[in-house]
Amino acid sequence: MGLKADLTAFATEAGFAKLGICRPDAVPHIAERLATFVDAGMHGQMGWMAERMHWRGDPAALWPDARSVVMLAEPYTPEHDPLAVLDQVDRAAISVYAQNRDYHDIVKKRLKRVGRWLIEQVPGAQIKVFVDTAPVMEKPLAAAAGLGWQGKHTNLLGRELGSWFFLGAIFTTIELPPDEAEVSHCGSCTACLDICPTDAFPAPYRLDARRCISYLTIEHKGPVDPELRARMGNRIYGCDDCLAVCPWNKFASTARDARYAARDDLLAPPLAELAGLDDAAFRARFSGSPIKRIGRDRFVRNVAYAIGNSGDPALGDALSPLLDDADPAVADAARWAILRLKEVQHDP
């Protein structure tokens, strides 16, 4: 227990808000849940969800030598209302986590620092660190480690953390005392389900990624179903609706790293400006940002959908150059958006 207490203190000093520990075999139920999700096709184009399912569904199989999983939470709580931009139809809504530096880099460096400290205390011990880039089911493991619980929207939330936090995992060969798993405190609340613009939750605790705006704007390649485009509003990268309405956010931990604070040019950027980005300008603007991962074409496709949903015919000029875009999905989005704006213009 002395090592665990010292580890918790060091992790807090390093910038994490909370630490919990579980065994690698603490989540035996996730293999069946993952298989049900994939078999139903709810993972959409995310083929990596189906690949290496034996590892994703069984953390103990990922690294058989591991004896403990240290789960850590790092808050990125916004200082502004993330839903306010949805009323600014000529502006783009970007998910809070992507409004500044890429969290993968920040969290992983902090994880490595904590991991190095840990193995210095136990000669011969080994670690592996993961931040959302390996076949690791972080949310169930974090719940098993007592950091929080998976809400009805399937995201993790906590009584001391709210909704706005990243997760990191340290697998280690060290035997550490596990924490008690957290239980759900959602009660009868359905705020997260009720606010979803695309009805992506077929039931509480179940998500159909194919209808989720975060999936559609980030993972989905090619044209988006027209019925769903019209529901995306001005959300061009991710969606925070189900997180933002959670009542537990009144207890949300404050973000400790200034690199998570929103950049002025990403808080509510003009849609017309973003529509004009070519590949070089896109890469320059989003250097060091998680947005860069989806590439210019998918990003501008999303911007075109948002312009079409704006109801503002004045934004149509920004779409004209995209009609002959080299990317078929961008050109299709521009055509759809122009037609949608014309329908609004002629609607009595």
Image (cartoon, rainbow, N blue to C red):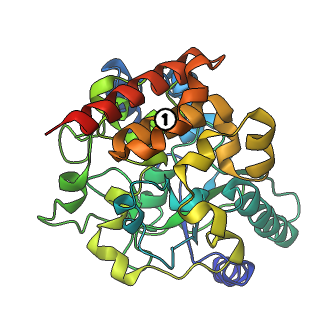
The answer to whether residue 97 of the structure is visible from this angle is: yes
**According to the image, label 1 marks what residue?**
304
Say which residue appears at 34% left-offset and 35% top-offset: 341
| Position of the N terminus by quadrant | bottom right
Mark 1 residue element? helix
Say which residue appears at 76% left-offset and 56% top-offset: 105
Examine the image and state in which quarter residue 109 appears. Answer: bottom right
In this picture, residue 347 sits left or right of residue 87: left
How packed mark 1 is, by other alpha carbons closer than 10 Å (few <14, some 14-19, many 20 or more), is many
For the residue marked with disc 1, what is the amino acid? Ala
The answer to whether residue 172 of the structure is visible from this angle is: no
Up-down relation of residue 129 to residue 189 (above or below): above
Say which residue appears at 27% left-offset and 74% top-offset: 247
Up-down relation of residue 69 to residue 246 (above or below): above
Up-down relation of residue 38 to residue 302 (above or below): above
Whole-percent x, y for residue 261 in the image: 63, 73
Q: How many numbered tags mark residues here?
A: 1
Whole-percent x, y for residue 155 in the image: 39, 54
Say which residue appears at 36% left-offset and 46% top-offset: 310
Examine the image and state in which quarter residue 88 appears. Answer: bottom left
| Position of the C terminus by quadrant | top left
Whole-percent x, y for residue 293 in the image: 68, 38
Whole-percent x, y for residue 218 in the image: 53, 37
Up-down relation of residue 136 to residue 172 (above or below): above
In this picture, residue 335 sits left or right of residue 171: left
